[in-house]
Amino acid sequence: MAEITPYAFLIIGLILLSGGADYLVRGAVSIATALNISPLVVGLTIIAFGTSLPELVVCVRAASAGAAGLAVGNVVGSNIANILLVLGAGALICPISANRKHCLRDGSIMVSATLLFIAIALTGSFASLSGTVMILLLLTFLVFSYVQGKKHGVDDLSMVDMDEVAPETAVPMMRATLWVITGIIGVAIGAELLISSATTIARSLGVGEEVIGLTMVAVGTSLPELATVIAAATKRQSGLIVGNVIGSNIFNILGVMGVTATVADIPVGGQILTFDIWVMAAAAIVLVSLILSGSALNRRKGTVFLALYAAYIAIQYAGVDRII
């Protein structure tokens, strides 16, 4: 029974983290709407950050707790899971395609951010200076997106579901405030349970913290993206599916890793340097190449994505050093 407890706490932590993030975002959107803040601003801040909030809280808490491997593993693992697992699952429901113009713009930014992440990782660590640069780049991206949204309309923002900022989604201020408070408490407790249980599981399995971050924690913190993609696939909104994943990956790299690096220096382990960052880069390039080629991500390709992700997880626990 004692061996089951860390896994139970991990699941409880993930539920609290995901649920808390959802309540926090919904409450914040309602408050911003009630204060007549521009829907475009709300979409590019609260909504866009919302899907990466679990990763952000986990990484910052892990960094402050000295679990650097868990933090960097979560970012890399989440970006891999977003493409191979989340998009793969969505493609089983409906074929996924996207606006080539939007994909060329946002996909190029995602690939560029990924290459920047790799370049910094190869130096051996993410320090405060690199974190600050990444945050400034994210702010630049948001300003650029705002200008594009003002110029071409909110439909140009494929990475944000602007329906979530509709006036009819607002709730009374008191209820929205309660949602925000509840969300903050849920996120805080969930992150604490998640990190403590993840480190315990890592020790019991004899693997590094980064492996748990790359797998269990990454999948758990990608649940908001998975829920969004499944909902969009059910409604046949394939453009929103790709945009959500690309946007989330950009925010994970520039926002989550950027903020985390300003909290504490994050050393990058040998396994991530020799294997995982290259898997992340390959997944990003394959996704953008598929969309730009005009080839939809159909059920067959989705199955391949899921099979590749299953193989990736298997390699993690079989031991990367014994396979490559």
Image (cartoon, rainbow, N blue to C red):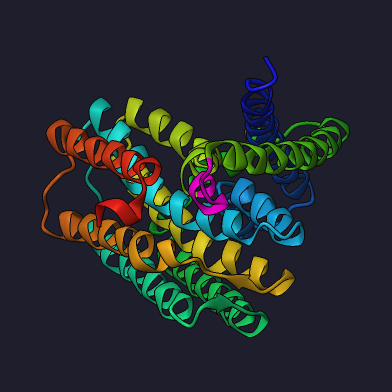
Residue 77 located left or right of residue 19: left
* Image spot of residue 294 (x, y percent): 11, 53
Q: Left or right? Give the position of 115 relative to 140.
A: left
Which residue is pictured at 47% across the width and 75% down the height? Answer: 121
Is residue 124 on the magenta stretch? no
Q: Name the side, left or right, on which 207 lies relative to 173.
A: left
Q: Quadrant of the C terminus?
A: bottom left
Q: Quadrant of residue 235?
A: top left
| Farthest residue, direction top | 1
Magenta span dominant secondary structure: helix
Task: State left or right for residue 214 relative to residue 110.
Answer: right
Camera-side residue of 258 and 295: 258
Q: Quadrant of the N terminus?
A: top right
Residues drawn in magenta: 206-213
- Position above or below: 104 against 211: below
| Residue 225 x/y as whole percent | 47, 40
Looking at the image, can residue 141 be seen?
yes
* Position in image of residue 78 (x %, y %): 46, 49
Kindly identify the residue that appears in the image at 33 percent across and 38 percent down: 314
Rendered position, 14 above or below 45:
above
Q: Does residue 40 show up?
A: no
**Residue 209 is covered by the magenta coloring:** yes
The image quarter in which residue 247 lies: bottom left
**Which residue lies at the image location 30% right of the left edge and 36% below the top edge?**
310
Instruction: Tell me where residue 79 appears, x and y as whole percent.
Output: 42, 53
Q: Is residue 297 above or below residue 143?
A: above
User: Is residue 9 placed above or below 61 in the rendered structure?
Assistant: above
